[in-house]
Image: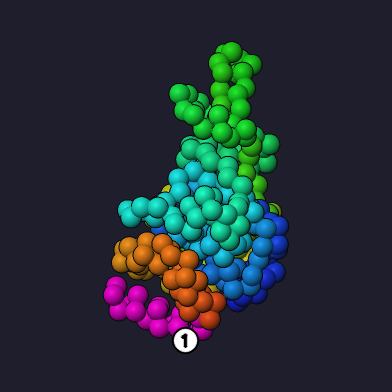
Amino acid sequence: MATFLSLADAVRENLHDGDVVAFEGFTHLIPHAAAHEAIRQGFRDLTLVRMTPDLVYDQMIGMGMAKKLIFSYAGNPGVGLLRRLRDAVENGWPNSPEIEEHSHAAMANAYEAGAAGLPLAVLRGYRGAGLAEVNPNIRSIICPFTGEKLAAVPSIRPDVSFVHAQKADRKGNVLVEGIIGIQKEAVLAAKRAVVTVEEIVDDLSTHTNACVLPDWTITAIAVVPGGAHPSYTHGYYDRDNAKYIEWDRIAADRDSFTAWMKENVLEATPDDFNDRVADLRRAR
């Protein structure tokens, strides 16, 4: 059953050194605030799982938190490289995480298999692709009914998944709207699930085909208005494209990256966060 906690307590009680952890959100609802709290608390040796590693994982990688990365597309959307990821892979700074790269389809199927409690995902994919040559976790299986050769990958079952959503009711049920991506499966596949939300409401006012995560699938909920910024939350605030462009300059240099992280994450205060939320609301 979901417990309402502060963000600091939700992260502290559910994330541990060495965990397999997913911070999921596709295009929007990316849980930046939760990732920043994990950075402030200094976790290490994490296996970071995410379909599209972008700014949030570039920051965690640059802070030396990643032992391994399991991902599909890695990049700064609409801008270019993840410079801290590239520095870690090519130069070992600040460490050299293990890399396990997949396609989007394989990651989605692996999450779904994990949510179903299955040990592997089977898909018709990777034909003509070279990823299997560098990823030993991409294997093949013969269909017992048709004899067709199919791709097989391990299911994804995180120790803990973090997602952001629009709102939760007072019972702990969570409404996710807009581009849902793989958030539902990431929650269902995980041993523990932490959700940050924009607000708590008496009634979710759900509609046909709404995605509602019931309270029994969630471990902890933290109210964090603006918790997805600089990505967007459908119905609340827009994507801050300038921040994504700015990140390319910040992350290009180790010193500028370290200075930015110190000022904007490690030493950030609640007042700084509240000012950011106020700016988002004014822009809306």
Q: In which quarter of the image is the N terminus?
A: bottom right
Q: What residue type is labelled 1?
A: Asp
Q: Where is residue 217 in the image (x, y as percent from the top left)?
A: 63, 56
Q: Position of residue 52 (x, y in %)?
A: 46, 50
Using residue 273 as the reference point, say whether residue 34 is left or right of it.
right
Q: Where is residue 283 in the image (x, y as percent from the top left)?
A: 29, 75
Which element carries disc 1, helix, strand or loop? Answer: helix
Q: Nearer the viewer, residue 211 or 97?
A: 97
Callout 1 crowding tier (Cα within 10 Å): few <14, some 14–19, many ≥20: few
Residue reaching furthest to the top: 147
- Residue name at image x 53 percent, y 70 percent: 36
In this rendering, does residue 252 appear at all? Answer: yes
The stretch of residues the image draws in magenta is 268-284
Residue reaching furthest to the left: 283
Residue 274 among those drawn in magenta: yes
Residue 244 among those drawn in magenta: no
Using residue 195 as the reference point, say whether residue 80 is left or right of it.
left
Quarter location, residue 226 = bottom left
- Residue name at image x 64 percent, y 54 percent: 67
- Residue name at image x 31 percent, y 66 percent: 242
In this rendering, does residue 232 appear at all? Answer: no
Q: Main secondary structure of the magenta part?
A: helix
Q: Mark 1 points at which residue?
A: 271
- Above or below for 152 versus 143: below
- Residue name at image x 50 percent, y 63 percent: 59
Q: In which quarter of the image is the C terminus?
A: bottom left
Q: Nearer the viewer, residue 212 or 24?
A: 24
- Above or below for 10 versus 150: below
